[in-house]
Amino acid sequence: MNRWPKVSLGELLSRKNEAAVLDFDTQYHEVTIRLWGKGVISRGKVRGSDVGTSRQVVRANQLILSKIDARNGAIGIVPAELDGAIVSNDFPSFDFYNQGKIDISFMGWLVKSTPFVELCRAASEGTTNRVRIKEDRFLAQQISLPTLTEQQTIVARLNLLADKVHQVNEHLDSAEIDAEKLLAVQFCDAIKNAPLLKMADAAPLIRREQIIELEGSYPELGIRSFGKGTFHKPPLSGSEVGTKRLFRIEPGDLMFSNVFAWEGAIAIARPDDDGRFGSHRFITCQANLQLTTAEFLRYFFLTETGLEMIGQASPGGAGRNRTLGLEKLMALEVPVPSITIQQEFNALQTKIAELKAKHANIRAANQALIPATLERVFQ
């Protein structure tokens, strides 16, 4: 990039001020900009009668930025589908008036790069919570600009790389969808004609209440919704725990969040969760290993049928008003095929989990390709 001649942004861009004249009965897209070059998107539609302050209109292929978050990569090109959308005055937009010198797609890639984000930071000023980009300072910033032919060559290569990245992600997604379908078929076969047992017999409650000491430290555990597993919370001191009751978690426990089990906050404690604690809102169960396994039960409760059962056992309104009752949970009947069948199914679960872990590493490396390439091109 250093070998390219310098040009100020003011030589390429001109501030656009198109005041929006809104019809009360018409709906308009409102624009927002994702951080770190993740794109210009719609935040939803709003009826003209519901817009209380002045708005500006943006047009396709304009450069748009957030005054507050341009220093965090909130800058991009307005896509065709948002032509005519509206924004507040905190989102200035710019026309490209020297298109014989700049390829808009080239600028679309450039603004995603770290050097351009640093440029935006240099054009911003203010105190910690009121840092904003200054438009005149922004337009005075200089970029290195190759010839139009070079720009188009770079754009073509970056577009090709982006397409390859997308293809890899699609391939990984497809493989995981197929794996989940296979798992679902295997589960249906496993529970066909299987006897039913109440949870009280298959995986009874287990409560290991902890005695709280003022000088003690008690790291808490959390459960993510939608079957996303556990996460670690910062430790609480004994004084911070106060009168709250804490229960010790052990690896292999089948756990339910009593307020969010209905949306899949169900997990199995991992080895690295050992020694952590859950509040009274955690329901912990221990599978009777002669009859069933926690892994098999977890899968069942995250199926459509299982979640419906949990929902019926969680009366109330939405959110925290829906509480899974202990007695209702223990009364639920779950399918219990032979241990051998369950273990075979669990082995398949493990293989698919290992596959997804490998895919996660591939995705991370794949997603890093474009940022790394942008650094090489524009640094």
Image (cartoon, rainbow, N blue to C red):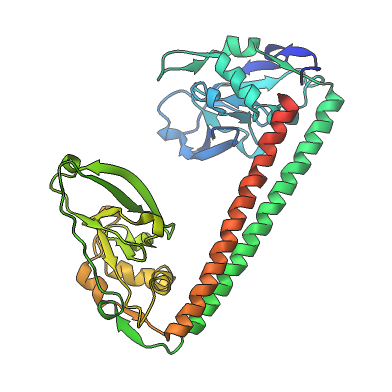
Q: Residue furthest right?
A: 149
Residue positioned 71% across, 26% down in the render: 107
Viewer can see residue 281: no
Residue positioned 56% across, 66% down in the render: 352
Residue positioned 58% across, 19% down in the render: 120
Residue 143 found in image quarter: top right
Residue 205 found in image quarter: bottom left
**Quadrant location of the C terminus in the rendered image:** top right
Q: Residue furthest front?
A: 215
| Number of callouts | 0
- Image location of residue 349, percent across then percent down: 52, 70
Q: Residue furthest left?
A: 243
- Image location of residue 354, percent across then percent down: 56, 62
Residue positioned 64% across, 44% down in the render: 367
The residue nearer to you, when weighing 172 against 33, is 172
- Image location of residue 226, percent across then percent down: 42, 59
- Image location of residue 63, percent across then percent down: 64, 25
For residue 277, above or below residue 253: above
- On screen, residue 224 versus residue 149, left or right, reads left
- On screen, residue 286 versus residue 49, left or right, reads left
For residue 298, above or below residue 114: below
The residue nearer to you, when weighing 158 against 336, is 336
For residue 108, above or below residue 313: above
Viewer can see residue 199: yes
**Quadrant location of the N terminus in the rendered image:** top right
The residue nearer to you, when weighing 231 against 219, is 219
- On screen, residue 222 versus residue 181, left or right, reads left
